Amino acid sequence: MDHVVYLDHKAKELENLISGIKTTIIRGAMGRKLPHGRVDVGDRLFFIRNNGEGLIQAKAQVKDVLHSEKMDPDTSINLLQKHLTALCLDKRMEKRFSGKRYLVLISIHNFEQVNPFEIDRSGYGNMDDWLPVGDIDTVKLEDIT
């Protein structure tokens, strides 16, 4: 399964992945929402900044994934703290995910930058920061070079 993953531009998530200091992606919410339960080891992730440019810049493969059960705030904070180094979150992002009932931690490997390309988002009316696309070739538009 392929997924399009929006990365926080202000937190420099893409830059931190490129430099190798970030090796884990996080998503969290008070309820179960994407990608909870929908991402597995071996899936491919395609990364795009949430700054409006709309270009896939890199890809990676899921090495490991943790889908948490419902947690109380203390358990959630402790889990987040345990993985802070791999997550490489700024203070704003750390605060955003602290205390969430459900967290998804996705360790990646085989990270590589790609020739930037756009995707067709018309099939995704409810825009979110995680799009399970099935096969990237079904939404890929032309490379931008």
Image (cartoon, grey):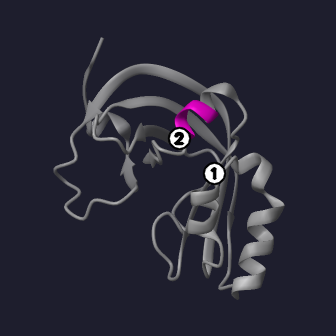
Question: Can you say whether 99 is above or below 141 in the image?
Answer: below
Pick the front one: 25 or 91 = 91
Q: Residue at x 57, y 31 (%)?
A: 15
Q: Residue furthest top?
A: 145
Q: Which residues are magenta?
A: 12-16
Q: Which mark is residue 90?
A: 1
The residue under label 2 is 44
Name the N-terminal-most of marks 2 and 1: 2
Callout 1 amino acid? Asp
Q: Residue at x 51, y 42 (%)?
A: 45
Residue 15 is inside the magenta segment: yes
Question: Can you say whether 141 is above or below 105 in the image?
Answer: above
Q: Quadrant of residue 110?
A: top right
Residue 66 point in image, percent of width and height:
70, 64
Q: Please state if 18 lies on the left or on the right of 74 as rendered.
A: left
Q: Quadrant of the C terminus?
A: top left
Residue 120 point in image, percent of width and height:
21, 41
The mark closer to the camera, 2 or 1, is 1
Q: Does the magenta stretch mainly form a helix, a strand or a loop?
A: helix
Q: Quadrant of residue 42?
A: top right
Q: Residue furthest bottom?
A: 72
Q: Quadrant of residue 71?
A: bottom right
